[in-house]
Image: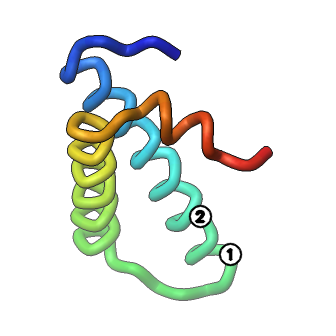
Amino acid sequence: MNLQSPSQRFICGVVFGLFLSMIAWSYSVYYHVSISLVQGVFSTLLLAVSFGVVAMFGNLDNLMDNIPF
């Protein structure tokens, strides 16, 4: 993965953050923990933007290489 532009890295981080937050939200439904719509949307956006900022300022290639499979 060779992302040169900071905006490309930010978008990739936002997508990854959205993916993780949707998984977390689905687990809350599975375990019958009621999260309100406002709290769920706000936490999803907060997590996605924070992942985007980390990906934009960090070295995303190094992060992706260190993910254990």
Residue position marked by numbered label 2 in the rendering: 26
User: Residue at the location (30% across, 40% down)?
Assistant: 58
Q: Is residue 43 left or right of residue 35?
A: left
**Residue that badge 1 annotates:** 30
In percent of width and height, residue 25 lies at: 51, 66
Q: Is residue 25 left or right of residue 4?
A: right
Query: Neighbour class for label 1 at 10 Å: few (<14), some, many (≥20)?
Result: few
Label 1's element?
Answer: helix
**Mark 2: secondary structure:** helix
Q: Are marks 1 and 2 in contact (CB under 8 Å)?
A: yes
The image quarter containing residue 36 is bottom left
- Give the quarter of the figure containing the C terminus: top right
Residue type, mark 2 in image: Ser
Residue 1 in picture, x, y percent from top left: 52, 16
Type of amino acid under label 1: Tyr
Instruction: Residue 21: give x, y in percent of width and height.
Output: 45, 58
Name which residue lies at 61% across and 86% down. 32
Looking at the image, is 2 positioned above or below residue 18?
Answer: above
Q: What numbered label is drawn on residue 38?
A: none
Q: Residue visible at 51% across and 54% down? A: 20
Query: Residue farthest to the right?
Result: 69
On the picture, is 6 further left or further right than 65? left
